[in-house]
């Protein structure tokens, strides 16, 4: 299949590989390594209350 | 660890430890399996510069130049730690220190004017009998003072008014908000209030107060009238749809227009085993004018006729795919776009590693307080005596309130690194280890993942990644 043009954070775009997100976990490891800054929203306070998720939380420090 | 799958005709590969996401050609997708075997053989040391004969043999049906090009690209990813990247054990996360409390769920009312069939709060009182139903202002402010004093080092704090139905105790809600604003200055904190309501008691005064003071309002509605009214009923049996929808529309329309600043809201529904075709309900919510929507699977014992069972999962997965298709279609057409809570993944500004590893923070940075002041690890543990951590009214000096440290240590230690089942799972950095309360409810152990919830979360993340890949 042919790749489409990407927009975000591409490190590779070729006929065979399109990287849409390079290293968000690697980057996340570098921030506040031991305990986090703790300023972001508790995930259960947002809209769920019954099914946990964290990846949609936005970092307060960015 | 790589998680690869095909969705909507796209070959997708998530490199779990780096978080990198790749859209691959058919050749590159197949080649990953061979690379993994090779790397396991040489203990993940390196890949040869030239495409090995074995791989060329296995992929002989493709043009040789394509195979070489795909190989070269995958090698580049591997060399940049974006494919088969390893977890970095050098980072020592500290889960054992006395973590500051930063969020409270205030169960301001254990009473409810509705009798929803699926209520996990036991129709409001969480199964706690013979205790007071409404939190008094003193208990509420003791909880707020407890939060202020236990949140050392944290600026942003959160308080959620929950129930039962919080608006049955609206005067206390109001007074707590206004009194907290005074304390914020004294303690140099920024408190964000959330309120979750069934909507039936909303009026002009309450809408104005909520829009002015509550930074995120969660409005319960299950979708179409027949869906909503089959579960969300008053004691007399009639449903709430006709009453609440105009009130929600008024609240949301005035939320930005009157205050002049954006404030969050979510229309939040529940789907059950009786309405697994929940996408039509979500579309209906959008047709009503709502743009921020969260619809979640019911939490229920298996014996209930509305419970979700493992055999329902294929239908639920198809429904999430239908929802993802609809979101993609609307985004491409730029019409009637909406935001579905569980498809929101922030690939660029997501949470830090600690947050991903620790999850929601229940029992450590997030606690719940009942009307009589009892403290629990979160709202879903309320009523389960063995998880009671303390009481905000226990001591005149709030700073002297003692919590059950042995119990809290169990929660401090609950994270995706210590939990072997989570540690080996590809979705761990998206879910943060799932819901401890669900684990306890279904497996009698906060560390033991609840499989149905895990499977549903995996499907939602697969869809969310595919949406990003297709729309980027």
Image (cartoon, coloured by chain):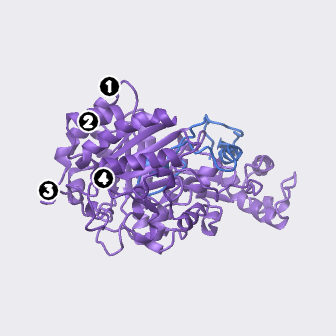
Chain colours: A blue, B purple
In the picture, measured across the screen, residue B141 lies left or right of residue B345, that is left
Q: How far apart are marks 1 and 3 (CA)?
A: 33 Å
Which residue lies at the image location 17% right of the left edge and 54% below the top edge? B239
Query: Whole-Å distance between the Cαs marked 4 and 2?
Result: 21 Å
Quarter holding residue A32: top right
Which residue in the protein does label 4 denote? B135
Residue at the disc numbered 2: B207
Pinpoint the chain carrying mark 3.
Answer: B
Marks 3 and 4, the one that precedes in the sequence:
4
Residue at 45 percent of width and 67 percent of height: B387
Position of residue B388 relative to residue B165, above or below, is below
Do tag 3 and tag 2 residues touch (Cβ < 8 Å)? no
Subunit of label 1: B
C-alpha span from label 1 to label 2: 13 Å
Pointer 3: what residue? B238
In this rendering, the label closer to the viewer, 3 or 2? 2
Crowdedness near tag 3: few (<14), some (14–19) or many (≥20) residues, C-alpha within 10 Å? some
Q: How far apart are labels 4 and 1 at the CA level?
A: 32 Å
> Measured from the top left, where is residue B64 in percent x and y?
78, 51
Question: Which residue is disc 1 drawn over?
Answer: B257
Q: Is mark 1 on a helix, strand or loop?
A: helix
């Amino acid at each position: 299949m042919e790749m489409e043009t990407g927009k975000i954070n591409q490190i590779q775009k070729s006929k065979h590989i399109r990287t849409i997100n390079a290293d968000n976990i690697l980057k996340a490891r570098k921030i506040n390594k031991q305990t986090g800054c703790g300023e972001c929203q508790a995930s259960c306070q947002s809209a769920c209350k019954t099914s946990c998720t964290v990846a949609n939380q936005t970092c307060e420090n960015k | 660890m790589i998680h690869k799958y095909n969705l909507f005709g796209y070959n997708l590969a998530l490199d779990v430890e780096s978080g990198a996401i790749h859209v691959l050609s058919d050749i590159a997708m197949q080649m990953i399996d061979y690379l993994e075997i090779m790397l396991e053989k040489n203990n993940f040391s390196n890949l040869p510069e030239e495409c090995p004969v074995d791989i060329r043999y296995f992929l002989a049906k493709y043009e040789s130049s394509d195979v070489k090009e795909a190989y070269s690209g995958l090698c580049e990813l591997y060399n940049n730690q974006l494919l088969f990247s390893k977890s970095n054990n050098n980072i020592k996360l500290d889960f054992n220190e006395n973590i500051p409390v930063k969020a409270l769920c205030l169960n301001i009312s254990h009473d409810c004017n509705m009798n929803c069939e699926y209520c996990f709060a036991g129709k409001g009182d969480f199964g706690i009998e013979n205790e007071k139903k409404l939190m008094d202002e003193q208990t509420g402010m003791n909880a707020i003072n407890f939060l202020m004093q236990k949140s050392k080092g944290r600026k942003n704090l959160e308080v959620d008014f929950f129930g039962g139905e919080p608006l049955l105790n609206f005067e206390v809600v109001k007074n707590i908000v206004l009194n907290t604003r005074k304390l914020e200055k004294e303690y140099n904190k920024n408190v964000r209030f959330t309120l979750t309501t069934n909507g039936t008691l909303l009026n002009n005064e309450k809408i104005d107060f909520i829009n002015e003071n509550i930074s995120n309002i969660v409005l319960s509605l299950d979708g179409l009238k027949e869906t909503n009214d089959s579960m969300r009923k008053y004691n007399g049996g009639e449903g709430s749809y006709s009453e609440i929808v105009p009130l929600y529309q008024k609240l949301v329309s005035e939320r930005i227009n009157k205050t002049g600043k954006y404030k969050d809201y979510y229309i939040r529904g529940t789907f059950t085993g009786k309405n697994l075709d929940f996408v039509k309900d979500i579309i209906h919510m959008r047709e009503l004018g709502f743009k921020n929507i969260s619809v979640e699977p019911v939490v229920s014992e298996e014996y209930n006729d509305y419970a979700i069972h493992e055999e329902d999962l294929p239908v639920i997965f198809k429904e999430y795919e239908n929802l993802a298709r609809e979101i993609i279609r609307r985004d491409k057409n730029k019409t009637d776009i909406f935001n579905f809570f569980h498809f929101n993944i922030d690939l660029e500004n997501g949470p830090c590693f600690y947050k991903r590893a620790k999850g929601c923070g229940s029992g450590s940075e997030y606690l719940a307080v009942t009307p009589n002041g009892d403290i629990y690890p979160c709202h879903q543990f309320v009523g389960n005596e063995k998880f009671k951590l303390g009481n905000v009214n226990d001591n005149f000096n709030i700073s002297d309130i003692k919590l059950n440290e042995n119990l809290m240590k169990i929660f401090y230690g609950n994270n995706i690194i210590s939990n072997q089942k989570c540690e080996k799972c590809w979705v761990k950095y998206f879910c943060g280890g799932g819901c401890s309360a669900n684990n306890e409810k279904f497996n009698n152990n906060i560390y033991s993942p609840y499989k149905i919830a895990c499977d549903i979360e995996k499907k939602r993340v697969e869809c969310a990644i595919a949406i990003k890949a297709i729309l980027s």
